[in-house]
Image (cartoon, helix red, strand yellow):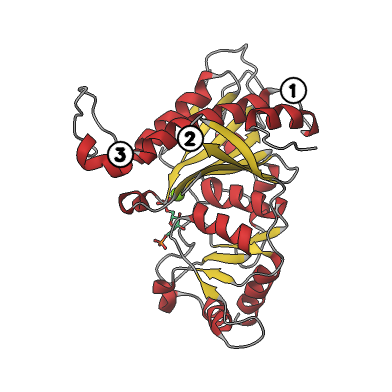
Amino acid sequence: MSQKNQTLGEFIIEHQSSFKYSSGELSRLINSIRLAAKVVNYEVNKAGLVDILGAAGDTNIQGESQQKLDVYANEKFIQMLTNRNIVCGIASEEEDDFIAINSNDKNHQNKYVVLIDPLDGSSNIDVNVSVGTIFSVYRRVTEVGTPVTLDDFLQKGSEQVAAGYIIYGTSTMLVYTTGDGVNGFTLNPAIGTFYLSHPKMQFPKVGTIYSVNEGNYIHFPQGIKDYIKYCQMEEGDRPYTSRYIGSLVSDFHRNMIKGGIYLYPKSSKTSAGKLRLLYECNPMAFLAEEANGKASDGAQRILDIQPSELHQRVPFICGSTNMVNDAEAFIKAAQ
Ligand code: AHM
Ligand code: MG
């Protein structure tokens, strides 16, 4: 039973036992993400002061060199996750290869691997538009106490034990699932505490928002073009409203609250779309399904795709279930 003014810390402890592998480790892992989120939030909030504090590559008044925010976020998340003995491996959209932790220590008991997109949509930072961090957690498949291998990371999305995002927006929120619904927490920046503000988030079954980069229209497959025309047609609750921030976390967050669909399809320019299966699509798909929504590559469930490489891209269609079903039907009809 959630209480009024419940903090994220309290929520994590209260819900620890509902997690099937409950041992406190996953709680500690979420706690380290909570901490990294606050640190990165502080820095993202200062981004507009870049002309005063110095741009990336400059040295600031304290003699510290300024970093690009995505590099900074990457370092902070890796640092916070490594510091507590829970994670045995991290893969990041910012790194070419995965990072093995404690690989020389045969006694370590770390069971979890984390995959992160430390600052998604970072091109939006310069123009004061919301960006996000996306994370995804799996139990390792190789033996505890041995170094992690690629197999620990290349698991189907359906094997995720937790996933979530932090949205650095008008408010900063942490939204996550451990497979028991989706809950959203808003940061009170004055005291640095996340409070449960959006319990049991759910996609409305039907929505009226479609989010797609229509500048790529002529390159889209026929089925996607047909679906976009359907969204724009005058009939019933259509035409739908078009909203595209170009920041996946923000577009997803809005659609989950208001009801809508997000599409990043393949095109004649990008055969697999743009978004990364492991860092972006799988965690968002897990959240979507836990919130009564749906995520597909146009033909199959995102969470059923067997990954073949760390930085693999896939077409991504995600949102209110009925809308994703409609988009899939148009794709099928055009084949
Ligand atoms: P990034 O990982 O390089 O930041 O790219 C991912 C972002 C998503 O947040 C967003 O939805 C998409 O790229 C926008 O791409 P486009 O500008 O092609 O529409
Ligand atoms: Mg990204």
Residue 154 horizontal side relative to residue 304, left or right: left
Report, in whole angstroms, how far the alpha carbon at label 3 lies from the one at label 2. Answer: 23 Å
Mark 1 Cβ and ligand 2 under 8 Å apart: no
Q: Say which residue label 3 marks.
A: 68
- Label 3, secondary structure: give it: loop
Q: Point out the tag, 3 or 1, that comes first from the N-terminus.
A: 1
Mark 1 nearby-residue class (10 Å; few <14, some 14–19, many ≥20): few
- Label 1, secondary structure: give it: loop
Where does residue 242 sit, x and y in percent of width and height? 50, 72
The amino acid on which the numbered mark 1 sits, given as a three-letter code, is Ser
Q: Is residue 188 above or below residue 229?
A: above
| Residue 258 makes an appearance in the image | yes
Please identify the quadrant where the N terminus is shown: top right
The residue at the point 74 percent across, 22 percent down is: 23
Report, in whole angstroms, how far the alpha carbon at label 3 lies from the one at label 1. Answer: 37 Å
Residue located farthest toward the bottom when viewing the structure as drawn:
234
Q: Say which residue label 1 marks.
A: 23
Q: Is residue 114 above or below residue 109?
A: below
Report, in whole angstroms, how far the alpha carbon at label 2 lies from the one at label 1. Answer: 30 Å
The amino acid on which the numbered mark 3 sits, given as a three-letter code, is Lys
Mark 2 Cβ and ligand 1 under 8 Å apart: no
Please identify the quadrant where the C terminus is shown: bottom right
- Is the Cβ of the residue at disc 3 closer than 8 Å to that at disc 1? no
Where residue 318 sits, quadrant-wise, is bottom right
Residue 326 horizontal side relative to residue 211, left or right: right
Ligand 1 location (quadrant)? bottom left
Where does residue 56 sit, x and y in percent of width and height? 24, 38
Q: Is residue 282 above or below residue 98?
A: below
The residue at the point 43 percent across, 65 percent down is: 270
- Which one is nearer the viewer's eye here, 92 or 98? 92
Q: Say which residue label 2 marks.
A: 189
Where does residue 267 sit, x and y in percent of width and height? 45, 70
